[in-house]
């Protein structure tokens, strides 16, 4: 599945301490392939990969994350944006009833989704009227009437064999008028569908839309049909004009091509997902959750969120500045270690600290997790002035600090050495030129 592929690609990137244009380019090649195999529209894939690649090598990255994490974040952000960014529900009109017109091909799931929406609104305490807007097919009306009975929701129905377009328009208008007269909050029109997009159907939908002026025109599309759903959506949008999309049968869609690209291709938001045949199988669409699901890496994302909470961008920039201007003190060192404690494993977290990637390298093998407490104890036994200026720490001060922290002078010396080498390395490697240097070293 797509999520497994993404996981593999990103794991590889996360593993590499430093990102080079080359390993990003390689990863992007794999991302591109994975998306194409998932049946995502090729043009959308091209844009996506370009944007992610550019952001990943550019400066639009959080200083507090490791390069690998940064790319995961960039990919997640872009996936989310590609699916519309914010979650999109249905806004109810301030002057009820809110009229929702459902359109789509036969078999897409329109009638079922009408029932799901009716149930959704009913649960919010709204009064819903379903309108059978396909009067030529008695079976269509029967299906809606049966849903209405199950849900105890009113159904407006005026079946008429051989109804003309004008008849259909009039039936819809009648339904909406009834909704208004009888104080319904929501009126849902279940229009007819065909097996293929054709002029007659489109003409009828355009006429109904013009007559009843719905607040929402929702296109119902079968996610399992992949790019066909996307192409069909494009045609409906061009000819009728829709305000949103409901993708059905998403639970059976292993590839995800329609979910990923329909928004970007049509410009219309996905509002809900149908995830089963039952009437409660309707989900509000959340691009962020879908992006997480596709990346299949909630763990990494929550780690990233934690890092973002712990270090605001400003804090990260401040620490960065101090590192580069050589005013990074033992106090800062201590503060960073305190953050480490808050978050979890040292190794993991050093990787998320501003400049921590480098600190981790500098301290490799020198500060195992169990020694952390000692390090903190040593720094805590220093006076404030000592922490801010390590050059004050002479022999007799070292003895005092060792006593205070229950360690010995050798350990105090080692800590100061670690601090200095970490600072030196961090300074050297901070900023673009440093990063480039390191990348060259590693290649
Ligand atoms: P319409 O012709 O567009 O009105 O489509 P229907 O509402 O009659 O649905 C066609 C078929 O798709 C029915 O068998 C539904 O049970 C099924 N269906 C609709 N939505 C979903 C869904 O989200 N998941 C699954 N698995 N089946 C669905
Ligand atoms: Mg139907």
Image: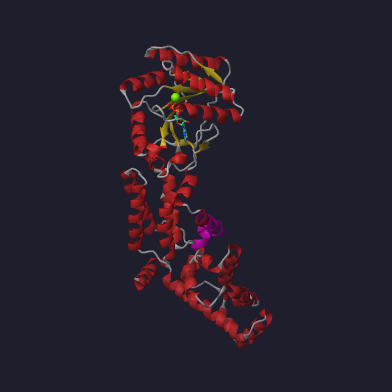
What is the number of callouts on the image?
0
Percent x, y for residue 68? 43, 61
Percent x, y for residue 229? 37, 35
Would you say residue 182 sits in the magenta stretch?
Answer: no
Write down the region rendered in magenta: 301-317
Q: Residue at x 35, y 21 (%)?
A: 201
Q: Residue at x 45, y 49 (%)?
A: 294
> What secondary structure characterizes most of the magenta part?
helix
Percent x, y for residue 319? 51, 65
The image's colour scheme reads secondary structure
Would you say residue 303 sits in the magenta stretch?
Answer: yes
Is 378 displayed left or right of 418 in the figure?
right
Is residue 74 in sight in this rendering?
no
- When the figure is inspected, residue 176 is found, relative to residue 12, above or below; the finding is above
Is 345 displayed left or right of 26 in the figure?
right
Percent x, y for residue 204? 37, 19
Q: Residue at x 51, y 72 (%)?
A: 327
Using the image as rendered, state which of residue 159 and residue 86 is in the foreground.
Answer: 159
Name which quarter of the figure residue 332 lies in.
Answer: bottom right
- When the figure is inspected, residue 191 is found, relative to residue 264, above or below; the finding is above
- When the figure is inspected, residue 418 is found, relative to residue 220, above or below; the finding is below
Is 132 displayed left or right of 227 in the figure?
right
Is residue 255 in sight in this rendering?
yes
Name which quarter of the figure residue 180 lies in.
Answer: top right
């Amino acid at each position: 599945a797509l999520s497994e592929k993404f996981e593999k690609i990103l794991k590889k990137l996360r593993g590499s301490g430093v990102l080079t244009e080359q390993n990003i380019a390689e990863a992007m090649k794999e991302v591109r392939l994975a998306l194409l195999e998932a049946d995502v529209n090729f043009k959308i894939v091209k844009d996506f990969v370009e944007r992610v690649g550019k952001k990943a090598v550019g400066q639009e990255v959080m200083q507090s994350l490791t390069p690998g994490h940064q790319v995961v974040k960039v990919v997640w952000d872009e996936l989310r944006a590609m699916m519309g960014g914010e979650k999109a529900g249905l806004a109810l009109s301030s002057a009820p009833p809110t009229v929702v017109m459902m359109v789509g091909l036969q078999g897409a799931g329109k009638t079922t989704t009408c029932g799901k929406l009716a149930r959704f609104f009913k649960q919010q305490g709204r009064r819903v009227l379903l309108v059978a807007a396909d009067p030529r097919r008695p079976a269509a009306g029967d299906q809606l009437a049966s849903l209405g009975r199950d849900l105890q929701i009113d159904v407006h129905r005026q079946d008429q064999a051989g109804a003309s377009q004008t008849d259909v328009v009039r039936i819809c208008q009648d339904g909406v008028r009834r909704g208004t007269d009888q104080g319904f909050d929501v009126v849902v029109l279940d229009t007819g569908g065909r097996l293929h997009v054709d002029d007659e159907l489109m003409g009828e939908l355009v006429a109904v839309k013009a007559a009843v002026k719905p607040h929402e025109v929702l296109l119902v599309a079968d996610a399992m049909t992949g790019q066909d759903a996307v192409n069909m959506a494009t045609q409906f949008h061009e000819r009728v004009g829709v305000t949103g999309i409901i993708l059905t049968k998403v639970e059976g869609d292993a590839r995800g091509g329609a979910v990923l690209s329909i928004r970007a291709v049509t410009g219309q938001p996905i509002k809900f997902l149908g995830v089963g045949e039952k009437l409660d199988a309707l989900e509000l669409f959340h691009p962020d959750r879908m992006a997480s699901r596709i990346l299949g890496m909630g763990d990494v994302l929550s780690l990233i969120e934690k890092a973002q909470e712990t270090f605001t961008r400003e804090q990260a920039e401040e620490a960065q500045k101090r590192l580069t201007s050589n005013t990074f003190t033992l106090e800062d060192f201590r503060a960073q270690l305190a953050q480490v404690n808050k978050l979890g494993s040292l190794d993991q977290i050093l990787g998320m600290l501003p400049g921590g990637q480098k600190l981790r390298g500098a301290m490799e093998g020198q500060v195992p997790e169990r020694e952390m407490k000692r390090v903190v104890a040593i720094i805590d036994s220093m006076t404030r002035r000592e922490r801010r200026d390590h050059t004050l720490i002479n022999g007799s001060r070292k003895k005092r600090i060792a006593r205070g922290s229950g360690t010995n002078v050798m350990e105090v010396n080692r800590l100061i050495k670690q601090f200095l080498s970490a600072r030196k390395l961090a300074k050297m490697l901070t900023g673009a030129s440093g990063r480039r240097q390191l990348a060259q070293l590693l290649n």
